[in-house]
Amino acid sequence: MSVVIRIAFAVLAGGLVWIGAGSAAEQVAGICPNSEGGKCLGKLKAGTYKTVVFQPKLTYTVPAGWTNFEDTPGNFLLVPARGDLLGVNAGTSEFIGIYTSVAAEARSCNPRPASGIATHPATIASWIRRQKGLVSKPARTVAIGGLKGVSIDVMLGRGAGLHCPGYAPPYFPLLYGLSPSGLDHGMIPGLTWRLYLLSFRSGTLAIEVNDLAHGAHLAEYAAIVKQLRFASR
């Protein structure tokens, strides 16, 4: 059971990202350092960038030290200087992940969408609030980069979670990726999520902010989220 990203996309070579004359970031990407990262750019200088294949197209701004480890049609991943890719997969690194289409996940060691839960931002947030074993705050209405929805902060309660074969920490499944996104994500002890659930097409686009410092870094990461811009087409 992986806390973080399960992807089934072909590996693509890096590309050229041109933001425009006078912009903060003009970068030629080499081979993406993540074998499952698609058109990711790798380590980033401080500046503004655009995704290559992620949908909807996304413009994002980061300070120095961040790394882009995924840019696939349905998954986008940013990791701060204090984190790393191996830690993302192990649940020991902070990150910002953006996923085109998600559903609530069944409480099971066999990943699958939860039955009977509509893929609407408010419905998923309400479902999270009802889950015994989770500590969450009331959802707040948000608008991020042209998309509207809700945000909710979530932690795992003491003693909660499943004990799944091959995975050591207690684990509470929460989000399951729908095409084109590939993910099976949940809570583990010591992790705080700030989850943005935004209406996109007929479903929910998710921005998942992972914090392993008891929420101390959420404000820093929220500042990056607030600068995101999604293309209208």
Image (cartoon, rainbow, N blue to C red):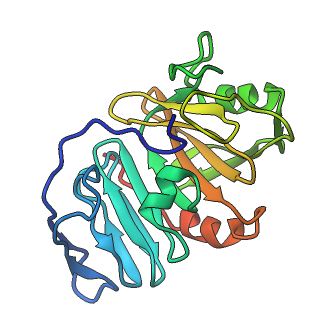
Name above or below for residue 229 compared with residue 9.
below
The location of residue 1, given as percent across then percent down, is 51, 34
Residue 214 lies, with reference to residue 161, above or below; the image says below
Q: Is residue 145 visible?
A: no
Which is more toward the observer, 46 or 170? 170
Seen from the viewer's position, the closer of residues 145 and 225 is: 225
Residue closest to the eye, 146 or 129: 129
Task: Give left or right: position of 124 versus 133.
Answer: left
The spot of residue 134 in percent (x, y) is 80, 36
* Circle count: 0
User: Would you place residue 10 above or below residue 13 in this image?
Assistant: above
Residue 187 appears in the rendering = yes
Please give left or right for residue 44 compared with residue 192 in the image.
left
Q: Is residue 53 above or below residue 185?
A: below
Left or right: 146 as drawn, with respect to 6: right
Residue 100 appears at what percent x and percent y? 41, 40
Q: Residue at x 41, y 84 (%)?
A: 46
List x then y, in percent, for residue 33.
26, 65
Q: Quadrant of residue 133?
A: top right
- Which residue appears at 77% of the width and 46% of the height? 155
Residue 40 in the figure: left or right of residue 139: left
Q: Residue furthest top?
A: 116
Instruction: Say which quadrant the C terminus sits in.
Output: top left
The residue under the point 24% across, 39% down is 9
